[in-house]
Image: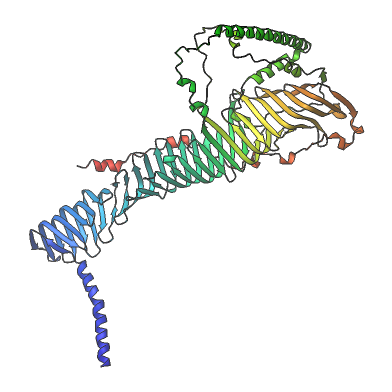
Amino acid sequence: MKGLYWCCLLWCVCTSTMLPAQQQGERKRVEILHTDFMKSLPFSDRKGNRLIGHVQLLHEEAVMTCDSAYFYSSNVVEAFGHVYIVKNSTRLYGDTLYYDGNTSLARVRGKLVRLEDSSAVLRTFNLDYNTKSNIGYFFNGGTLADKENVLESKKGYYYSDLKLAKFHGEVEMHNDTYDIHSDSLHYYTKTETAVFLNNTSIWHKDGYLSCKRGWYDRPRDYFHFAQDAYVLSEKQEMWADSIFYERPVEKSDLYRNIQMLDTTRSLLVFGDEAHLLGEQEATVTRNPSIAYYEEKEDSSHRVKRDTVFLRADTLKYMSLKNPAFYGTDDTLKTDTTATPQMALPPDSTAITSDRIAEVSDSIAIISDRIAEVSDSIAIISDRIAEVSDSIVIISDRIAIISDSVVVAPDTIAPPRLMPLSSNMILDSLQKDLRRLRSEVPKRTPSPAFSAMFARKPAADTSKTPPAPVIDSVLQYFYAYRAVKIYRADGQAVCDSMVFFVNDTLTEMYYSPVLWNTNNQVSADKMRFISRDSTLHRGEFLGSAFMVSEEDTVHYNQIKGRDMFAYFENNEIYLIDVMANVQTIFFMDEDSVLVNINFAESTNMKIFIKSRKVSRVKYLTQPKNDLHPIDDVPREKQRLKGFAWQDALRPKTRYEVCDRDIRPSQRAAVSAIAKPTFPITKKIDAVK
């Protein structure tokens, strides 16, 4: 009984394992569903049947139809005329078919072969399609189209189940936004996502992009470029190891080995992480630096580049809408063409008489003030006559105060300071001309009388003077923490810096220090202003201290509350030292330092000509003491607060920016041929 049980169990196992194999073998056999006429083949070496008219065959859920076919006993079919294969949502059209039922491979050929599914249409001349795995392979050129994209290549695969096309060899892709050329590209037709596997170039209306790896999400219009990623626009070029770009919001994220070139601003930006939002905002971190270059022709007409390098822990640029430009003026809401109607009280005549009396008194007061002003002007005129060489300087200072000046981008560079000469002329005035000028009473006429004293224009009064130009956007550049600046003729350090682009004004904060040749200037805060793209004024505010190195032991020193340096054609010609001025100068004879001069004054002027100090003037209560150097102890040869900070000074540009500069690719890109889609054009020509 027990033996019979084991025999039955063994028979059941063998039967269960044999049935699927038999069923599988049966499924592999191509079945004839229909034919109008069938007869045996006349060939002795090849057994089978010839099928003629409305032939229908079935193999593993794939239905094949044609006009006629040879069905061989080896499970092979040769079909001709109107070949059509359908499986699920996939349809395949051609002129001839060689189908091997043992491998499920259909070789479809014809004047035009077309593979369709729910998401795309593939057209080619030669297609091998596996009906079991639903994978097609084309060669000698093919083109694929979906709702918005067209792709072509010399050869490729199409995975119907995955809705995936793998194209290789001169791949070209087109939609209403981009033209793409790639050595190898994968495209998911359902999600409209392209994956770049090798050298890829992309053209669009705003510029050009290239990379060796990456992907493109068409619905979101979102790109990722990797390995030698490069972006070109009308104004900029960008390089990075990795770039993410979201076009609808113009958002870019760049990582590693970043270089951005802005030709409109003559600016290079470097870093290892950057986040850009259109032209409104840019932040660069992880060892960021910039290089601002200026190209000029020398006397030999050779182009010479002068470059300023700057680094900080974080660099940031912002562009904001200017409320003054977009704001609405309430006065525009009022009808200015109507004549205002004034309601007069019953006693208006009396009131008017009183007002006339008040006006008369005011005129008398103003007349007295004018007399006072005239007297003060006479005093100033006498002083100007005594010091005629200061007229130009005073006039320029008045223009500076009354003018609204701005600084150009090149004022990021430290201004060129002149060394303090030891053979200077020490001079003084009895009174500060600036103080005399400030003593002139300044009276603002009452609005009721402003029309009386208004200067009549010489031109046609019917013409309205042009309104001041207001920028539509306000632009700012920030450098945060550990700022260093290098230029061949000047260097600087500070904690943080702000550049106001509209005003071309640069401000440096928290212990800024500036060097030029053997000069050093420090202050609590520094400002640099330009006019017409030329450095105009430098301001050193709070604890201003200028040091000039005579040798490694002796230093000329100027100390004051504030210092103001004035430039013409980017050359300094005057320095004003304001409030509590203290100086130490070393005097030489036959190039040997022999004397030391101590001086104090309320204010001070330093005149510079041809890059040399031509004269020094101590203004208001000057004190001078001259001593032999040997009579003054070393510790007394330093003013309080003296610090020669040469250790902080960047000696080369590589201490500020150690990046290798990539050359522009703009010219090379313009020579690259755009996609012409020759395969698609050839296939489209087939009727």
The number of numbered discs placed on residues in the rendered structure image is 0
**Image quarter for residue 71?**
bottom left
- Left or right of 158? Residue 392 is right
In this orientation, does residue 422 appear?
yes
**Quadrant for the C terminus in the image:** top left
Which residue lies most toward the right here? 631
Q: Foreground: 266 or 455?
A: 455
Q: Residue at x 73, y 16 (%)?
A: 437
Q: Nearer the viewer, residue 468 or 135?
A: 468
**In this image, 122 relative to 667: left or right?**
left
Residue placed at 46% from the left, 33% from the top? 234
Q: Classify 156 as above or below 505.
A: below
Would residue 662 be seen by someone viewing this image from the given angle?
no
Please give left or right for residue 13 compared with residue 515 in the image. Answer: left
Q: Position of residue 485 (x, y in %)?
A: 65, 37
Left or right: 159 in relation to 62: right
Image coordinates of residue 491 in percent, x first then y, are 68, 35
Examine the rendered structure and indicate whether residue 98 appears above or below residue 433: below
**Residue extending farthest bottom:** 1
Residue 290 at x, y percent in the picture: 59, 38
Which quadrant is home to the N terminus? bottom left
Residue 609 rendering spot, x and y as whole percentages: 73, 20
Tell me, what colour scheme is on the image? rainbow
Instruction: Tell me which corner region of the image, top left, top right, bottom left or bottom right, holds residue 147.
Output: top left
In the foreground, 69 or 395: 395
Residue 398 vs residue 298, the one in the foreground: 398
